[in-house]
Image (tube, coloured by chain):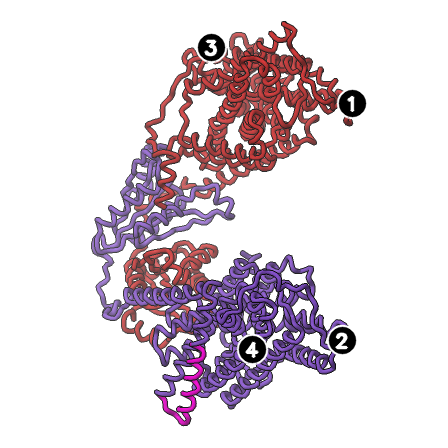
Chain colours: A red, B purple
Amino acid sequence: MSTVSQLKRILIGKSLPTSAHHEQRLSNAEGLAVLSSDALSSVAYATQEILLVLITAGTAALSRSLAIAFAIVLLLTVVVLSYQQTIRAYPNGGGAYTVSKENLGLYPSLIAAASLLVDYVLTVTVSISAGIDALTSAVPAFRGISVGLCLVCIFLIMLANLRGVKESGRIFMIPTYAFVISIFFLVAAGLFQQATGHASPIVSASTTASSVKPLTIFLLLRAFSAGCTALTGVEAISNGVLAFKPPEWRNARTTMLYMGILLGTMFLGITYLAHIYQVLPSEEETVISILGHQILDQSPLSWFYYVIQTATLFILLLAANTSYADFPRLSSLLAQDSFMPRQFSYLGERLVFSNGIIALSFLAALLIIVFKGDTTAIIPLYAVGVFTSFTLSQAGMVVHWFKEQTTGWRTSAIINGLGAIATTIVLSVIVITKFLLGAWLVVVTIPILVSIFLGIRRHYRYVANRLSIQEFAPRGHLPRPKGSTATHPAVVIIGQLNRGTVEALDYARSIGDEIVAVHVDTGFTNRERLQQRWQDLESDIPLVILDSPYRAVVNPIVDFVQEFEELHPGVLSTVIIPTFVTQTWWEGLLHNQTAFFLRSALREKRCRVITTVRYYL
Amino acid sequence: MSTVSQLKRILIGKSLPTSAHHEQRLSNAEGLAVLSSDALSSVAYATQEILLVLITAGTAALSRSLAIAFAIVLLLTVVVLSYQQTIRAYPNGGGAYTVSKENLGLYPSLIAAASLLVDYVLTVTVSISAGIDALTSAVPAFRGISVGLCLVCIFLIMLANLRGVKESGRIFMIPTYAFVISIFFLVAAGLFQQATGHASPIVSASTTASSVKPLTIFLLLRAFSAGCTALTGVEAISNGVLAFKPPEWRNARTTMLYMGILLGTMFLGITYLAHIYQVLPSEEETVISILGHQILDQSPLSWFYYVIQTATLFILLLAANTSYADFPRLSSLLAQDSFMPRQFSYLGERLVFSNGIIALSFLAALLIIVFKGDTTAIIPLYAVGVFTSFTLSQAGMVVHWFKEQTTGWRTSAIINGLGAIATTIVLSVIVITKFLLGAWLVVVTIPILVSIFLGIRRHYRYVANRLSIQEFAPRGHLPRPKGSTATHPAVVIIGQLNRGTVEALDYARSIGDEIVAVHVDTGFTNRERLQQRWQDLESDIPLVILDSPYRAVVNPIVDFVQEFEELHPGVLSTVIIPTFVTQTWWEGLLHNQTAFFLRSALREKRCRVITTVRYYL
């Protein structure tokens, strides 16, 4: 125990008192870094996922990526505008669960909650595996151990969060802005090469010869769906309005706008570069890595390639980290509303929701192992949860505006309505085009989660009901049963007559008014001697010796106790089990564990009061 | 639980009452089959182990096998004669442990016991792996899975013994006599071929070219040691005298003589055949299999080869099975004498010493896995234990005769003395020649086992001493403490105020005369409401609310209980833990397991009386 505690102390740090809780407000630049890493980091994989779908229809189809990117940026605009209305309406933070609970009712809110939980797990999985992709693109030697690297990352992020990462804007700014600057630099360098006529398309063995699918509308929609992962995380700022300096909602809105502009520009820029450099997407190397090599390798800035890859890795780890704030927070909200086990609402030693952090890490690690850390394999699962919560959140906002009718509600309602319609359509497209690729898993999981939520609440309500003391009378005024006959019966289990059992019998005398001792003879008891010693020492307590021809010890006792309890209806019978405790656990192995098995069996037979009287050697 | 019970019922059978114990007497022919399979079966590997040592000095050295075999048969004669004296002196069965305990004292008897336990485990390991060798010699396809086959055999033998194999002489006669007849037939056929001039030596690629060791005395002694495994199990009849029909000791003596003659003849016969057919020993095929092919393949009786191999397999399984009677029996004797954990002395549901059977299977399986089922690798460990117990047993007999001085004691003493001297010499030879090959493992294990035996007895004696009630006065006459102030203090742990805790408080009132309730506030308790309801219902019991700024629940309670106990020295304070029990285990996951952790922590802090008051939902 001591070693475990020490290890825990080193890894997690010492306990913090509840009073150490405090809030820290963020400037807009910090808020952007802390809350947008999830959204911005999707630039690292969104273009690639579009190209990987298109390439199945041959290299010529890749040129469609630009149009798809424009469509996604349009969708992004709608979603950002829509969430700006949410920020105004919910200055205390309006997550999809809260908004749909208040405006749409129980079931939509639980669907939103389930979608979000799934989404948070997938954010960790996708971000970590994409981050490791960035690493293995730069250092191919690590490719063989990518699953292991993913798991190590999850473990380290879990530890950091169990310690309690303060959402310290300063530190978080470094990877976020490094990534933004790197991408802008890469785009600028590429555009400059194009303008000066130096942009040389990547020459590669033509893969068009291999069997290609026709470029159907379905395929284009699938490419669009794949690209929609760029939108994951844009809602984060609307959840964290209170983290900004006053006036909170204005600052949050401004920050959200900047985030949308940065995300849209970077995404378009990378997609455009991939287009002019005719990047062939590959499972081995990321699009950004291919572009980085192509644009920078011949220049004096070739070292900057490693800056880009490092920044990409770190912003993706940061994106994973945001789920470590969101998942435990939502779990604790759900636990407080009795939809999840109460343990999720407890603050751990370091003032974080430890159980949520551990559950998230476990689930993400499981997915990494199941999908072998393959980003492209996990992506089809990703967008379903995100767009479900988008849709429910915007729909909830429309209801909100019709209920509240504050100034300007009509404009807001129209914007949110447009957002809801757009995200509903996209959600349908995603579910249809990616259903067989893995989206079905999420479509199946969400209703299962919802029914688990409801089952858990049903259980807690049942328990509360059964334990209710509404109509109870004051207890102190009740007549005390002490003194009347057989109001406090007790059974003492006797193995041998020794110091431990003698003391247990003394204890029984002090608490009981009808005591019986019971011994099981498995055929090896010296009855005469036992009876003799009993008469010498304990003659005031009747001793019952049970025969056990099959040598079982536990069952005869349990049967006897049950009969004894039936003879004393309406009062609690105490079962007293004397036991002696050895100094070390291995000394315990030299003795029977009858007491242990007896306790389990009595519990199974619904025995109410079991008293262990220990004798320490 | 139910599924496990059902599976157990199917595999092991239903419980048997103690009264089902009964004895069955064996005829001499049955007794030979039941008690000699271990000894006779060693013919299957003893010759081979001699040859495998000699071959390291080149093929020419193989001719020395005959002389070695004669020396071993001489030793066998001495040992058999010596044990016949034991049978006369101990008509109730004289195992090495019993004989040395009575005549040589504590330490020699424990050394004998340790040697025997080691020997029994090795008998299972060697017999099973040699049996599987016989199988893979006939069916080479099984060679790759021989370790798996060994483990399956151990598992099946364990199951059969857990069910309780009646030592039914009839069934056991089949493999034993089939083996004896097969070997005699093989020897006869071989001798006939030689007599008729058809015995054609096996022609094989000469291996003499490879680096050979010189044929030193040491190597010859090592070959002799290897062959001494033929003597394992010859003592079995002397342990089981009571299994014979009256006059038991005479019948046992006669049977022992026949056993010695059969064993000696078969061993000499096989060794002679190996000599005239110039068998080259190999790790892939057993000597008996090579001889079988050579002698029978060209004849119309070639199918008889498979009879030999099958009979060999089954007698070896039977030999392993004898350890399943001996190991548990000796363990239970040691457990009754407090040298092994008491659990080894308990008869299981099927009237067998289940714990001994399971322990033996586990150890044998472990050795099979460690040594990869390689018979030749395990053999060097084997003979040490056997000859240690031989030596101690015969030496004990010499002392016995000098003490008893019954008729003919001088002759018996001389025979036993010769036996003791011979086995002592052989034991030294075995230890010296095989020390580095693995015998050291046994030489190290035996003293370790002896010190464990002594440690266990020390522990049991300490416990008995601490629990002794020698000087206790009759308890019923002691003044009952009930009624005086604070003679029965109780602490009730309160999470919330609900039906379960209210009932626990009622229970506390019925047994205690100074009650205090304690609640831990981790910062989330509505204190005002709790205090209010407490005043309404439980105003007669003081409620202590402990602050827990670090949100720990268990530690504040444990500290409080310790202080409370210190305030009431000399009496037992009862700690009452109310707990509610859900209908299924997974519903239990939705609640805290505080009660569980609290009980462990209180136990660690040496809290004496813990009462659980359960409320069933």
Identity of the residue drawn at 41% across and 73% down = B112
Q: Nearer the viewer, mark 2 or mark 4?
A: 4
Query: How far is the residue under mark 2 from the one under mark 4?
Result: 29 Å
Place residue B293 in its image quadrant.
Answer: bottom right
State which tag comes first along the sequence, 2 or 4: 4
Left or right, A274 with reference to A256: right
Residue B301 — which label? 2
Position of residue B155 relative to residue A284, above or below, is below
* Whole-percent x, y for residue A191 in the image: 61, 8
Identity of the residue drawn at 69% across and 13% down = A67
* Whole-percent x, y for residue B394 in the image: 42, 81
Q: Residues within 10 Å of mark 4 (few under 14, many from 20)?
A: many
Residue A214 — which label? 1
- Range drawn in magenta: B403-424
Q: Which residue is mark 4?
A: B69
Q: Residues within 10 Å of mark 1 (few under 14, many from 20)?
A: few
